[in-house]
Image (spheres, coloured by chain):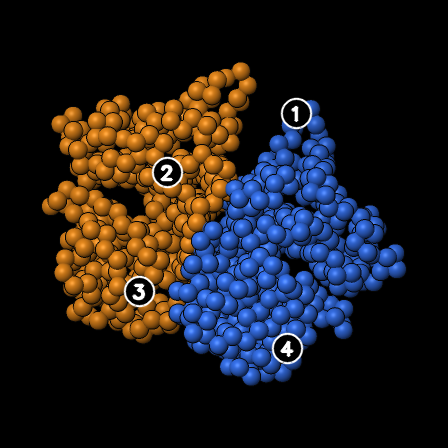
Chain colours: A orange, B blue
Amino acid sequence: MLHDFTYYNPTRIHFGKSALNKLPQELENHGTNVLLLYGKSAIKKIGLYDQVVALLQAAGKNITELAGVDPNPRYSTVLEGVKLVKDHQIDLILAVGGGSTIDCAKAISVAAYAEGDAWTRFWINGENVTHPIVPVGSILTMTGTASEMNSGSVITHTDKKLKVGRVFPSFVNPVFSILNPEYTYSVPKTQMVSGIFDIFSHLLEQYFSGNDDNTTDYVIEGILRSLIVSSRKALINPEDYEARSNIMWCSTLALNKIAGVSKTQDWEVHMIEHQIGAYTDCPHGLGLAVVSTAYYKYIYQEGLDKFVRFATQVWNIDPSGKSKEEIALAGIDALIDFIKELGIPTTLRQLGVTEEMLPLIAASTFPGGGYKKLQQEDILNVLKACY
Amino acid sequence: MLHDFTYYNPTRIHFGKSALNKLPQELENHGTNVLLLYGKSAIKKIGLYDQVVALLQAAGKNITELAGVDPNPRYSTVLEGVKLVKDHQIDLILAVGGGSTIDCAKAISVAAYAEGDAWTRFWINGENVTHPIVPVGSILTMTGTASEMNSGSVITHTDKKLKVGRVFPSFVNPVFSILNPEYTYSVPKTQMVSGIFDIFSHLLEQYFSGNDDNTTDYVIEGILRSLIVSSRKALINPEDYEARSNIMWCSTLALNKIAGVSKTQDWEVHMIEHQIGAYTDCPHGLGLAVVSTAYYKYIYQEGLDKFVRFATQVWNIDPSGKSKEEIALAGIDALIDFIKELGIPTTLRQLGVTEEMLPLIAASTFPGGGYKKLQQEDILNVLKACY
């Protein structure tokens, strides 16, 4: 059943090969001073940087640049952005890049005119945002986080070895996002599959909760099926527009709240991965995949019926002659096979985790869990099982 | 693949048993003068009228009422609303009822300050809306049209015997909509199943288009699966909250644009039904069901692969040992069986259509079509096949 919820998503999405043509009309809604935020040189290699700068100039905007946003965006970069926003009276933060860049843009947006220590107030203490923020627009070049259509912002505080995700109210969403699947062609294969598994994991975190009959679960199964089909095509040909366009939209749908409607969610795989990321800086999706290989086998018995459904509805496991337990395990094995098919590592060791890190990661992970409530010891068991 | 699209849906949805509690905070965003728009006595019977009036009074609003909106809302009612909006300087039109009432509210919203003849300008000529409109909020008591989260407005001009749907830009959407599944309990069974098939038909109109691999089709299949399961439960017990809450959200998802992303759509079943409705005033969903029993058999060979997919993915038809044609027909038969299971008539005659009306209905229907392009003669053939 559907538990009470409020759904509101005010981001305008422009999707497709011609999506950048919509940038000028979006720029008309904002003031003159634009902070152009991006990562490394990727957007220059594909010519996007030049196109965006030309459109900004044609619109008469003053451009301030902040480059070098890291894959796990750092709070120190957020503070650099805050200074630029104040110094240049920025009217719009335009993030060009993947989820990391957009997450960083939202963090700058919220932190810019906040009093006191924004990190502690908003990421640690989860305070509400009541002060003015700076609008964010985005041009997406990498799929995975759905940051282009949500209010999440995952920031890493390197000094404190903490990677913390915060979901802000919807007014922190990008006001517009431009999604051209062709921009994702040049992403290296490791990042492509990392993004794909990030999407997969977002869907699973929302799916594996509750035992009721809920429309949202059917929607998630549909997105998962599409994602599996298109991922296999993209592995063969990364420039398959059909596959990449579907993956890009699956990514947005996976975390723009539609797939979370009325679902209680614990996000435990993400909780564990965030701490792995804080210790190793590994690509987020790869960390999620490795944790998933062990986590679901550790908890499935407490959510048996849902894992049976996952096996039959997502992986077309034939249930005949099998016990519920066998069906459920066959579904998890199909998931692990898919991870291998994507060419993703299946051990923490391959991601740079050392044996000494395991208890530190376990101790610093929030011990939640859904079907099975986890203690710190359980998290250590999961980590050891995929080490 | 995903064709270029812009997606934007600014409606805030409050869903669930406690959703009405969110009305006061929504009212804070609007001025003092509220036009309360509703249909017949249904909202009084369930006590909702009194609750809403009490909340409006508590918020210090001046209430102007317009009651008696018809199931196929009439342009004459729209004109009554326009007069009230101007006379009372209305700040918010609050529609309490089903899709008809909300469609009527949007029509009043657009027509209120339009120069010239709004019917001709916006419903017949499809002109863009560039003048100020009046915000609409809604409290939904009947599912089916998704008018609570879109910009559509179907209005019947009784003098001209025309029922015309218009999709306005997103700023015509209700700014907020309150959805409590319990309000739908008291809807008579005929209207419940009419609403269910309306939802079903919205999904099919979007699904049966294109031959590509498109994430949206997987999403539609998921919503259809959920709708089938919950409809069967609601037939047994109309007060099954799990079923009714899922149906209510399926209804919104079916036509809030998510299920239409990147799909070319011809809406031919609706085109035909609208003219049946103009001649008979029959419940919309019942008309759609009757037309569907004949229409899909008339066109399926031109979209064979999609009808095969419909059969296997939505109805779990076992394809082994069957030709594509046999699989496709088995899927359509499963749909017809479902219509019968809902207790819906399967002939136009049962809806009050006379033999004399058939050529008139055919001649006044827009001859579009997707997989198969239809001429006026084809429409007459479809009508005869379900007469």
Depth order, front residue of B140/A101? B140
For mark 2, give the secondary structure: helix
Question: Which residue is under mark 3?
Answer: A135
**Rendered position, B116 above or below B313:** below
Task: Tell me how far mark 3 sits from mark 2, CA to CA.
Answer: 29 Å
Question: Are the residues under badges 3 and 2 in a single subunit?
Answer: yes
Task: Tell me how far mark 2 sits from mark 4, CA to CA.
Answer: 51 Å
Question: Are the residues under badges 4 and 3 in a single subunit?
Answer: no
Residue at (27% x, 50% y) in the render:
A166
Location of residue B160 in the rendering, given as x and y in whole percent from the top left corner: 76, 72
**Rendered position, A209 above or below A333:** below
Location of residue A77 in the rendering, given as x and y in whole percent from the top left corner: 18, 54
Whichever of callouts 1 and 4 sits on the residue coming sooner in the sequence is: 4
Can see residue A138?
no
Task: State if disc 4 and disc 2 touch (CB < 8 Å).
Answer: no
Question: Which residue is under mark 2?
Answer: A205
**Rendered position, B379 above or below A31:** above
Q: Nearer the viewer, mark 1 or mark 2?
A: 2
The quadrant where residue B153 appears: bottom right
For mark 4, give the secondary structure: helix
Task: Tell me how far mark 1 sits from mark 2, CA to CA.
Answer: 35 Å
Depth order, front residue of A137/B118? B118
Question: Which residue is under mark 1?
Answer: B320
Whichever of callouts 3 and 2 sits on the residue coming sooner in the sequence is: 3
Residue at (59% x, 83% y) in the render:
B115
| Residue B80's disc number | 4
Location of residue B84 in the rendering, given as x and y in whole percent from the top left corner: 58, 79
Q: Which residue type carries mark 2?
A: Glu
Q: Which residue type carries mark 1?
A: Ser
